[in-house]
Image (tube, rainbow, N blue to C red):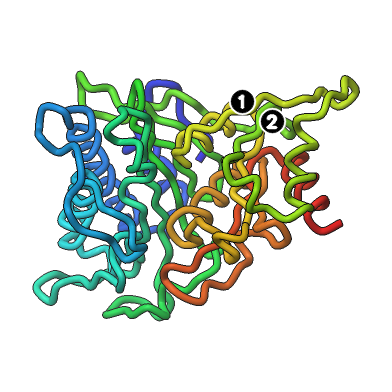
Amino acid sequence: MVHGDIGTTVTKLILGEQREYPQASGEFSSLFVELTVALKQISYEVNKAGLLNVLGKAGGRNVQDEEQQKLDVMANETIIRTMEYTGYLCGMASEENEKVIEIPDAYPKGKYLLVFDPLDGSSNIDANVSIGTIFGIYRKGGGTGKCGEDDFLLPGRELVAAGYVIYGSSTMLVISTGHGVNGFTLDPNVGEFILSHKDIKTPSKGKIYSVNEGNYQYWDEKTKRAIDYFKEKDEATKRPYTARYIGSLVADFHRNLLYGGLFIYPRDSKSPKGKLRLLYEANPLAFIVENAGGTATDGKNRIMDIQPDGLHMRVPLVIGSREDVERVTAMLNG
């Protein structure tokens, strides 16, 4: 998906790629177009949040036992409502929902599975910090029909496509269908995502490390040494690195993807199994970074080779520039 000129719409680029495969049914392209409709609606409501009275807490807790924000609920419902009737999905799974989101019997079933984090970084909403949506698309084994939890327990290497949207100073969509990574900026004048970052390649070695150092006391010694490495002065290896941590995974990942560097959320004594969700966060971003030339591990294993054991499985995450991730992974296992 590296063809197309700056200024091309995301729809045109997806359709152009479809035409390269004469056997393609067009279902994926149509599915993706519908998904962008939901993402544009979320962008509108995020950007107008202070005026639409959707800031603040919703009063409930999600399956992760996290307090939901009003925008969390809005984004989740927007994606579900937009996608359930399309006929291209056999089911969805959301970070906000305990179980698989079934397609109502009134609507036809398709051959794709959609997983998503509707609003990543939502704890930052009221402070007007950049937040985002993360998604991944799989093909259901066995074709169409109803699907259950087991259908979603696929390793990241089975992804057909993945992407994220960052709602910042502008709204940007970054996607990959396994053939490169492209970034599109939403033009509010025409209501379209326009190609602005063609064929994104992340540097093999960066200058930024992103980690919540407030958790330092909860890390084991190997993790502490790995993080300390990036703070030591060494002109030969261009250290120390610059520390940058927003606390919004999409925002931290996006910056490092473009500039080079790594994001680390290691396991610690508070979260011995890791903090981030494999299906909704780690796998889609690992798919993106690998297609941009980077890599992602859980501190030992390639993220996209991990077999999920449940819809809400958590993992540690080391993701970004290949040389930096490989160094941290080696230090964690040394």
Coordinates of residue 124 in the picture (x, y in percent): 35, 36
Amino acid carrying label 1: it is Tyr
Q: Secondary structure at mark 2?
A: loop
Mark 2 highlights which residue? 203
Label 1: how many Cα within 10 Å (few below 14, some 14–19, many 20+): some
For mark 1, what is the residue? Answer: 259
Callout 1 touching callout 2 (CB < 8 Å):
yes
The tag on residue 122 is none
Frontmost residue, 112 versus 218: 218
Q: Measured along the vertical axis of the image, is residue 184 above or below residue 317?
A: above
Residue that appears at 76% across and 33% down = 230
In the rendered image, residue 141, in percent from the top left (x then y), is placed at 43, 77
Horizontally, is 131 left or right of 325 in the view? left
Work out how far the residue at label 1 is from the one at label 2, CA to CA, in angstroms.
7 Å
Residue 250, x across and y down, in percent: 45, 39
Farthest right residue in view? 236
